[in-house]
Amino acid sequence: MNDTIVAISTALLEGAISIIRISGDDAINIVNPLFKEKDLTKVRSHTINYGHIAYKDEVIDEVLLSIMKAPKTYTKEDVIEINTHGSVAVVNKIMEILLTKGCRLAEPGEFTKRAFLNGRIDLTEAEGVMDLIKSETEFNRKLAINELSGKVSTLITDLRDRIIALISNIEVNIDYPEYEDIEQVTIDKIKKEVSKMKQELSKIIKLSEDGKIIKEGIKTVILGKPNVGKSSLLNALLEEEKAIVTDIKGTTRDIVEGSIIVGGIKLNLIDTAGVRKSKDVIEKIGIEKSINLINEAELILLVLDASDELSEEDKFLLDKTKNKKRIVIMNKTDLENKNKYSYDVIKISAKTAVGVDDVKEKIKEIFNVKEILNANATIFTNTRQIALLKSAFESLNDALTGTLENKEIDMIEIDLKLAWERLGDIIGANYTEELVDNLFSRFCLGK
C-alpha cells in the first residue's frame, strides 16, 4: 500500500458535480503542482479550497478541492477529493493527468480495503459500507448504518471479551493446580456463562437469518387453483396492473414477478399458474413450475376462494405447504361465502383491496420484523457472518457439553478458544489475504 491510488467516486455521467478521490503518501505532492491557487503542503487539514486544476498552462476545470491529512481520514492516509463539474470529458482529462503524474487506478473497494488494513474499521464495518450503498429499503439502511457505526462489531467484541475471561480462569486453574477449590468454581462459572452466551447467540442467529432474508427480499410465491384471485392479489399488493386478470380459468400460464416494499422490507412476489388437472401442454408446464416453486419459496401466500367449496386442488396445496412459512388467504369475501373452513385464514377481497393490509401485517409478524427493529437492527445479514456465528455457537455447545460430561478442563478450553476465534473471524481479527481480496472485489470503484 505504498503507492497512491485514484478513482472516480461518483457515477461517470453528465451531472452537476463529480468527485475524484486520491489516497496515499504522495497524494498531496502529486496534486499540488496541478492546483495553482495554493500550496497544498501548507494548507490546514480538513479544509475545502477553491481554485483551478491546470496542466501545461491549460486550465482544465474550476474546482473545490478537499484536503484531509493522515491519520484522521477515511483510509488513514493523506486523502484529496477534487470536486469538478460533472462533465465526462473534464473528469476523464483530470484522471488522465493524475495517472500520468504517478497515481495508480484504484481497484474496486480499495479505499475501504485500505481503511480496514490500516485499522480504521473492521470487516463488519467495511461490509456495512457496501450494504449502505446498495440499500433499497429503510430496513436495509438501518442494518447498514448499525454495521457501519460499529454497533454490530461491539456485539462481537463483548462476547469475545467474556470468552477470554473464562479462558483466563481456566489458565489460572492449569497454572496453579495446588488450589483444590479452583476447578469446581471454574466449571460452575463456565456452565453459567456458556449457557447464557449460547442463548444470546441462538437469538442473534435466528434474528440474523430472518434479517438476511428480509435484506435480500423475501421470495414470496402466490399459490392457488385457477381463478381464485392470485393475479388480483398480486396487483393489489403491487398497486399496479402487473398481471392479466380475467374470469377465464388458466389465464396465467407462466410465472409473473414483481417487487414491493412492505413496512420497509422488500417482497419479491411471484404469481403462479393455477394448480389443477389439465390436458393443455403449455398450462401443464406452468402448473409444474408452480409446484416446484414451493420448495424455493421463503413465504407462501396460499389463496382460497370464499365463494366456492374446498376443492381437491385446495386440499393438495394445503397439505403441500403445511411445513412452509405461509399465509392462508380467503379471497372473494365480497361474494357469498360457501367455503367452510376450520383453519386460520386472512379474509380479503383482492378486487376491492379490503384486507390486503392485514396480509402485509402478517408478513411482518412471520419474519419478526418488529423484533428485529426493536433490537435496533443489530444483527448479521450475510452468509459469511451467519456461518461463523453458527460455528462459534457449535464450539460453545461443545464446551458446555464438556462441562456436563466432566471432561478435562484443558479440552473445554480448546472449544472456548475455537468459539473466540470464529467470532474474531467475523470482525476480521483473523483473516486471509484471499478473503479480503474477495470481499472488497465486490465493492464499487471509488469506494
Image (cartoon, rainbow, N blue to C red):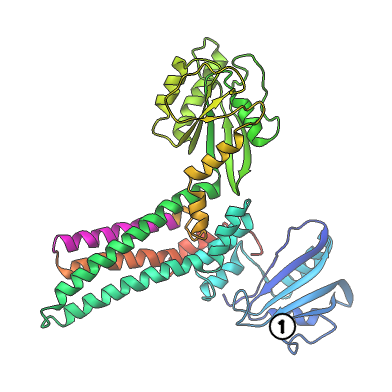
Identify which residue is drawn at 51% across, 11% down: 278
Q: Is residue 446 left or right of residue 218?
A: right
Majority secondary structure in the magenta region: helix
Which quadrant would residue 47 be assigned to in this image? bottom right
Q: Residue 131: in sight, yes or no?
A: yes
Which quadrant would residue 424 be assigned to in this image? bottom left
Q: Nearer the viewer, residue 6 or 258?
A: 258
Identify which residue is drawn at 49% across, 37% down: 299
Residue 268 on image: x %, y %: 58, 39
Residue 190 on image: x %, y %: 24, 68
Q: Is residue 281 above or below residue 111?
A: above
Which residues are the magenta region?
385-406
Identify which residue is drawn at 82% across, 57% down: 14
- Residue 403 in magenta stretch: yes
Q: Is residue 388 above or below residue 172?
A: above
Q: Is residue 228 left or right of residue 368?
A: right
Task: Check disc 1 and give the amino acid type.
Answer: Asn
Q: Nearer the viewer, residue 388 or 189?
A: 189
The N terminus, quarter of image: bottom right
* Mark 1 lies on residue: 29
